[in-house]
């Protein structure tokens, strides 16, 4: 059976990152930690080589590959949230654990991996049939770091609905 697994490169912190994701997000777990069976150039026996884990149901493999490659915004996890409390909890966990804020619902964890913490309300407003409302929501989102659902909903209603 063919399967697809997201492979993520870390500089020695794959297990730490995977355990953080497992504590932070639902439907997430560390499912395997694989250690070196012997010494090797640049490493020792029992050093963690790879970590199998899931993030919100997505299968991943973390590789402790060293400093050669870094994460970039070209890849991100998008976590769709149902309410402001969930949005706040995930955002605050990532940023509060040594991560950093970016714009429009994007943040970066302490290992350099990018995340989009995206309320379902934003997706629905942007894809709805009222293009003027979508534009107002888009303009509001463009001013935000962490997404504020109440502000989006006010923008969606427009000046007459406030």
Image (cartoon, rainbow, N blue to C red):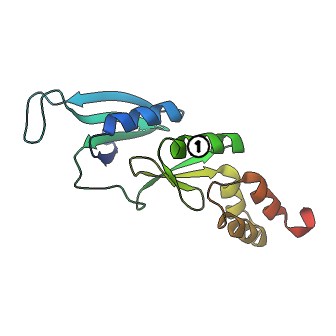
Q: Position of residue 46 (x, y in %)?
A: 17, 27
- The answer to which of 125 and 102 lies nearer the viewer is 102
How many numbered tags mark residues here? 1
- The residue that label 1 is drawn on is 92
The quadrant the N terminus occupies is: top left
Q: Is residue 117 above or below residue 50?
A: below
From the viewer's perspective, tell me whether residue 36 is left or right of residue 33.
Answer: left
From the viewer's perspective, tell me whether residue 82 is left or right of residue 153.
Answer: left
Q: Is residue 149 above or below residue 40?
A: below
Residue depicted at 36% across the width and 41% down the height: 60
Q: Position of residue 54 (x, y in %)?
A: 42, 36
Quick check: can you spot residue 27?
A: no
Residue depicted at 61% across the width and 52% down the height: 118
Residue 142, quarter of picture: bottom right
From this viewpoint, which residue is outermost toward the right? 160
- The answer to which of 3 and 110 lies nearer the viewer is 110
Q: Position of residue 120 (x, y in %)?
A: 66, 50
Q: Position of residue 114 (x, y in %)?
A: 45, 53
Q: What element does badge 1 sit on? A: helix
Badge 1: how crowded within 10 Å, few (<14), some, or many (20+)?
Answer: some
- The answer to which of 112 and 133 lies nearer the viewer is 112
């Amino acid at each position: 059976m063919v399967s697809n697994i997201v492979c993520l490169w870390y500089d020695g912190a794959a297990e730490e990152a995977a355990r953080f994701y497992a504590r932070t997000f639902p439907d997430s777990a560390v499912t395997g930690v694989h250690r070196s069976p012997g010494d090797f150039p640049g490493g020792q026996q029992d050093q963690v080589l790879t970590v199998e884990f899931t993030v919100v149901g997505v299968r991943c493999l973390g590789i402790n590959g060293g400093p050669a490659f870094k994460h970039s915004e070209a890849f991100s996890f998008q976590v769709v949230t149902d309410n402001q409390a969930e949005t706040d909890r995930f955002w605050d966990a990532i940023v509060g654990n040594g991560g950093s804020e970016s714009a429009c619902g994007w943040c970066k964890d302490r290992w350099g991996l990018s995340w989009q913490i995206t309320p379902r309300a934003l997706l629905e407003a942007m894809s709805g049939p009222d293009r003027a409302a979508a534009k107002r929501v888009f303009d509001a989102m463009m001013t935000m770091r962490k997404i504020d659902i109440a502000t989006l909903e006010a923008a969606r209603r427009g000046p007459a609905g406030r």
